[in-house]
Image (cartoon, rainbow, N blue to C red):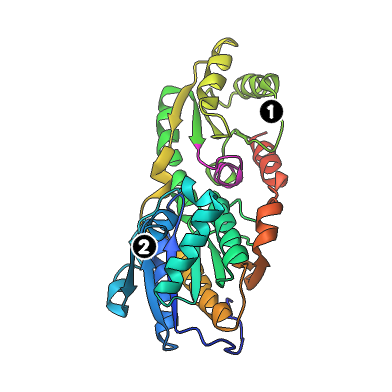
Amino acid sequence: MYRLPELKKNTNIKAIAVMTSGGDSPGMNPAIRSVTRAALNQGVRVFGINRGYSGLIIGDIFELKSSDVTNIVQRGGTILKSDRCEAFKDPVVRNQAGEILKEHGIGGLVVIGGDGSLTGAHLLTHETGLPVVGLPGTIDNDIYGTDDTIGFDTALNTALEAIDKIRDTAVSHERIFLVEVMGRNSGHIASQVGVACGAEMIIVPEIDFKLDALCFSLANQRAEGRGSSGIIVVAEGPKSGLTYRLANQLETHGEKPGVCILGHIQRGGRPTGHDRVLASCLGAAAVTYLMAGFTDIMVGMINSKIIATPLLDIMNKKKPLNPQLVELAQLLHK
């Protein structure tokens, strides 16, 4: 059961701002809604920043009313738009951004995004003194300090639905399909969707992969009379083209795999109930922490408890992959 932190108001903040940054993720809109209404219910004005840090540095800021966030809880994407801002890496630009926020009377900021966005949040509060609280908004689920990131569950279920349909074709044509899922340098989506879809193998950046082992597994599957079809889930990894390179390697061993890149479909769509609840709880908690005088933290969920983690830890610590999920997929395939 999720419980909001019981903290006493300890600031005179009259207005806060909220922004979404980096890659969009399903659940950002419920988070925006939660931040907005939680603050308004405390008599605090709320401002939205369009297009993340790119909008901040040009002053693309507008006031949010309760009506502005009506009927967005079920919508994917982000009503505040998003962007990746190279200019914000410059400390001079960050200081200008701090001045822009102060000119609008904004005394606190909620940043919803992934590790790059949260790094920017840490630098902003460290250099300008403006209170900042981050929320983990990314489908990759690679943020330290939270069990799930906002959008991960939706992306997982989107990928699972697609793979279930691909398996129908794989079985019908007795073929192996390599299905690439997103995740950048992490295999969190791949490991969980691989178990959920009954994948024959899961390939992730965190665990060494041996082509010979895969070929042996496929040959053994045929020898035991379990057919020639199957799904191999591949995390995209840091370098593009991994799945096609793997397909070419398999062809040299006599296999004829199909390739399906799920791509950005995993970022879109209506957020699941889990992501809506998670985003709503974390959004309200972010306001509670800001009003209590906290800054330079990210609010996450661990073991169904809302936890505040220093942004410096988010920057310096890596969220580990559970290798037992990959092992489980292989065990259940045998």
For label 2, the SS is loop
- The residue lying toward the viewer, choosing from 238 and 17, is 17
Circle on res. 209: 1
**Amino acid at circle 1:** Phe
Where's residue 333, x and y in %?
64, 35
Is 150 drawn above or below residue 102 in the view shown?
above
**Amino acid at circle 2:** Gly
**Separation of marks 1 and 2 at Cα, in angstroms:** 48 Å
State the residue at coordinates (64%, 73%): 305
2 left or right, relative to 323: left
Where's residue 228, x and y in %?
53, 22
- The residue lying toward the viewer, choosing from 2 and 198, is 2
For label 1, the SS is loop
Where's residue 177, x and y in %?
49, 27
Q: Nearer the viewer, mark 1 or mark 2?
A: 2
Q: Which residues are magenta?
A: 181-194
Task: For the C terminus, give its image quadrant.
Answer: top right
State the residue at coordinates (54%, 43%): 183
* Rendering quarter of residue 132: bottom right
Q: Answer whether residue 285 is visible to the viewer in this image.
A: yes
Q: Residues within 10 Å of mark 1 (few under 14, many from 20)?
A: few
Q: Residues within 10 Å of mark 2 (few under 14, many from 20)?
A: some
Check residue 263 for magenta coloring: no
- The residue lying toward the viewer, choosing from 150 and 318, is 318
* Rendering quarter of residue 81: bottom left
State the residue at coordinates (59%, 23%): 225
List the residue tagged with mark 2: 59
In primary-sequence order, the first of circles 1 and 2 is 2
Check residue 182 for magenta coloring: yes
